[in-house]
Image (spheres, rainbow, N blue to C red):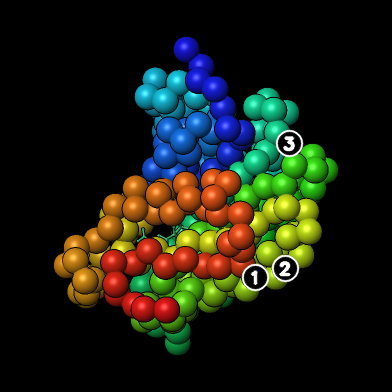
Amino acid sequence: MIAKSLGVALVTGAAQGIGKAIAMRLASDGFKVALNDLNSKKEQLEAVAREVVEKHGQASFVVPGDVSQEKEVHEMVQSASKTLGGLDVMVANAGIITPLKSITDFDIDDWDRILRVNARGVFLCYKHASKEMISRKQGGRIIGASSIAGKQGCLKYYPAYCASKFAVRGLTQSAALELGEHGITVNAYAPGSIDTPMLKQTYDENPSEMLTSFGESGQPEDIASIVSYLASKESRYITGQTISVNGGIYFD
Ligand code: NAD
């Protein structure tokens, strides 16, 4: 049975990790969910879509595509909105991290690749989601993935990743200023160490200790719960913020 819906949320990078947890949480909150990830992850994405329906009785829709390509983001937003009946929440979660490398050897292609997904991709999601939300005149919630590395350049040997996550904060603040008059809030989350395939890749490359107050990494659901709040009506007066969820590694 399909449950009553609060609206429509689109989540990028939803095949695994934090994106999957966000999609499951928003579905459990009562949103219909459109799920994006790369074409190469289509099977994983379809499995998440089935889980959404089975566990939460919400409609789900798979919109594969590369967030760094404007045409694909435009089509993804349009088809999600058309199929599920609007767009109320956009979560620009997809991101990548480069191999550990000193700035002196850092390849320009790696720099471009990281910025293309983590900064340009988030910008394109904000752009096309806000256009759709403005045209529907019902406000909305736009939420992006920054990082603890977007608050402090604290990851040695990941210069492009740190720069890309700072970019998300600046973009979030500027878009928030502009979109408030349309009833759209724009915020970001800044995770510390969250137990996902990306974190495993980072630790395998650089197993230095990340000290948290709790002595352990967070779970994807810890990020999903702040996104749930930012997507809710209760967060109406919060905008332009990048909210740390880092277990006390760093205090704002
Ligand atoms: P992950 O690697 O487990 O999942 C990211 C997903 O994004 C993957 O499924 C991947 O296929 C998808 N993706 C990559 N490029 C894409 C593209 N061009 N178009 C569409 N999808 C694409 O990572 P995660 O740990 O779940 O991270 C999610 C977000 O949170 C990322 O933006 C990441 O930078 C950020 N973050 C994660 C941590 C952490 O500790 N895990 C910490 C800080 C910030």
- Note whether ligand 1 is within 8 Å of mark 2: no
Question: Can residue 66 be spotted in the picture?
Answer: no
Marks 3, 2: nearer the viewer? 2
User: Measuring 47% from the left and 66% from the top, which residue is drawn there?
Assistant: 243
Q: Nearer the viewer, mark 1 or mark 3?
A: 1
Position of 24 compared to 238: left or right? left
Q: What kind of element bears circle 2?
A: helix
- Looking at the rendered structure, the kind of residue marked 3 is Gln
One can see residue 238 in this view: yes
Which residue lies at the image location 51% right of the left edge and 59% below the top edge? 145
Residue furthest top in the image: 1
Q: Position of residue 134 (x, y in %)?
A: 79, 48
Label 3 with label 2: CB-CB less than 8 Å: no
Distance (Cα) linking label 3 and label 2 = 25 Å
Location of mark 2 (residue): 177
Q: Quadrant of residue 239?
A: bottom right
Which residue type carries mark 2?
Leu
Tag 1: amino acid: Gln
Give SS at disc 3. helix
